[in-house]
Image (cartoon, helix red, strand yellow):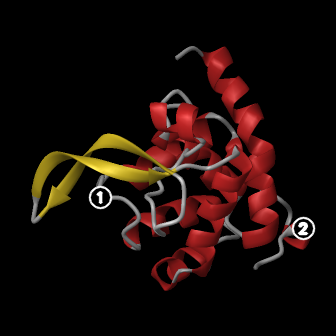
Amino acid sequence: MNKDRQLAFIAQVAPAAQASQRRTGVPASVTIAQAALESAWGSSELARHCNNFFGIKKAQRDWLYCEFQTAESRSGVARRELAKFRHFETAEECFERHGALLSKSKTYRAAMQHAADSLAFAYQLQVCGYATDPSYSKKLVALITKWGLRKFDLPREEKRHA
């Protein structure tokens, strides 16, 4: 993926990440970095066909979903399996759901305590168990730093937790 497409992706998703931050307190820079990393800069089939930039799986029976092959680890053994992922009508809906998951779940409470510092927040996501990739937080921090994503984080007075 070339730099122009990456910059275009950032510009495309930044407003949704900031809107989510206003409602949930999750730093926009972290959300943008996660979306870039988890959707291959918006080019994954899941992002393109289902507006799902974070690999959010289907949680309720009446929700729209898409099925894709995924790598899952069960008892330390990686295997491919068909999984049901949430289908969102819009990218904004996906970003809002992602922010709500992080801000309302007890699992990510420690990360939310670092919401004023996006780099610390990214590291805490790993500690909280957000991803099984042991380099996940380092990848997020590298994206935030390389692309200057902290400029999208809202000043504290603009943040409003749900």
Can you tell which mark lies on residue 144?
Answer: none
Q: Quadrant of residue 148?
A: top right
Compared with residue 150, is residue 121 higher up or lower down, i.e. above or below? below
Image x and y of residue 76, in percent: 10, 60
Left or right: 75 in relation to 56: left
* Element class at badge 1: loop
- Of all residues, the one furthest to the right in this rendering is 157
Q: Nearer the viewer, residue 7 or 143?
A: 7
Can you tell which mark lies on residue 158?
Answer: 2
Q: CA distance from mark 1 to mark 2?
A: 32 Å
Left or right: 7 in relation to 71: right
Q: Nearer the viewer, residue 2 or 23?
A: 23
Q: Residue at x 45, y 80 (%)?
A: 107
Image x and y of residue 147, in percent: 65, 34
- Of all residues, the one furthest to the bottom in this rendering is 106
Disc 1 target residue: 132
Q: Residue at x 67, y 30 (%)?
A: 9
